[in-house]
Amino acid sequence: MTMLFRLMAPIALSLAALPLRAEVNIQEVTSDGGITAWLVEDHSIPFTALELRFRGGASLDEPGKRGATYLMSGLLEEGSGDMDAQDFTRAKESLAASFGYDVSDDTLSVSAKFLTENRDEAIDLLHQSLTEPRFDEDAITRVRAQVLSIMRSNAQDPNDIAGEAFARQTYGMHPYGSAMEGTEESVSALTREDLIHAQHNAIAQDRLYVGAVGDITPDELKTLLDDLLGDLPTAGAPLPGPANPAFDGQVRQVPFNTPQSVVLFGQPGMGQDDPDFFAAYLLNTILGGGGFESRLMKEVRVKRGLTYGVYSYLVDRDQAKVWMGSLASANNRVAEAVGLIRDEWRKAREEGVTEEELAAAKKYLTGAYPLRFDGNGPIANILVGMQMSGMPIDYIATRNAKVEAVTLEDVNRVARTLMDPEKLSFVVVGQPEGLEDAPVITPAAGEQEAAPEAMPAQTSN
């Protein structure tokens, strides 16, 4: 789904990067106040990237207040303390610092980049945005209007409609089942007090993870952690329970006036904490996660030209583990594409994969892994993700060995036990021919059929 509030300023600091490498020396640092962070120390550039992540995110919205966390996150740099929005922006720019605030269903993220010479001032300003946001009425009105505009645009986008319909069908009344942006009705009704509650619910020490990369020592980081985060609330709102995703194997449609249908499909998946995760990861790479070498891409695009691209991916959410995929195809050929995906799912389960496919998938995954470590910011992001997933601190050094250790027997066993063609479920948004008998999902509030000229035709190759 479309994300608003990716507010990282395109300044020169964003280009600073550590040398490309997969050998990363991670230190665990704990401040005097008990706040823990993972640090990659590198003094070659007088610059540090800091990543904060708070577990819970938009799933913490209170009943009837859907969209509060999303709107709140967009207001964190719209003024704080004695500074209005313009004063805050001028102060940040004068420090050559960059702050970004983002939210997902599971997390609220804060990304910061700053020069060593301005570190103390930048941290003071960031601290103020987290602990003393103003939530001025004029800022609320302005940002709320931006959110409503994005929501109205999404309601005319078949990709967003498909995501919303799939989520509602899969997750029901769980927070995952509704758009984190909220609805026009819920967002329009949010008050300043609601945003203050959302801030206190989401930004707290008991759900905090920190990664730091760059020109900072462990002792300096300890001081920074307590100065920045030491006076946050000790606890936030309770996390939601499991989502219990539902997959019944049906194809459902959302009528939408467009020459090309958008398809999402999925079944139960597997989390990274499962001993068989790497076998499932390799299996997915072979099936639909390996680009043009994947089975789905070969069968659906290369051999038959039904789509520009078809992909599958394991989705490891805090409260649900699913295996999903997506494609877009002309209305008169989408039914064929859906049938091919079912066939490939069944074939992989019943016949397994080959030694040659497994070797190629291993080469792809191990070779691409170092490319992720291409800058201070991306590495800080990886450090936080590792912590949230419960990975050991030496995971980066051992990850490729775990991939290489997976055997053909492992992958084919997981294919037999995890892949479930009978539960593989589809949502198709468009005017699909050959699927007219598929049950119809009523569009969410605000979604309307687009005019015929709203989306140009695309030709599959």
Image: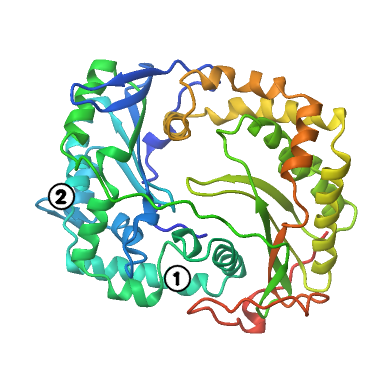
Could you tell me how far apart the alpha carbons at marks 2 and 1 are, in whole angstroms?
Answer: 28 Å
Is 179 or 290 nearer to us in this picture?
Answer: 179
As drawn, is 117 to the left or to the right of 396?
left
Residue 181 locus on image (x, y percent): 41, 64
Residue 286 in which image quadrant: top right
As drawn, is 389 to the left or to the right of 330?
left
The residue that label 1 is drawn on is 151
As drawn, is 162 to the left or to the right of 179?
right
Q: Amino acid at mark 1?
A: Met
Image position of 338 with respect to 406: above or below:
below
Is 408 or 90 nearer to us in this picture?
Answer: 408
Residue 165 locus on image (x, y percent): 58, 68
Badge 2 or badge 1: first in the primary sequence: 2
Q: What label does residue 132 carry, if any? A: 2
Residue 138 locus on image (x, y percent): 20, 69
The answer to whether residue 447 shows anywhere in this view is yes
Looking at the image, which residue is at 32% across and 22% down? 46
Q: Amino acid at mark 2?
A: Glu
Is 269 or 262 nearer to us in this picture?
Answer: 269
Looking at the image, which residue is at 34% across and 60% down? 61
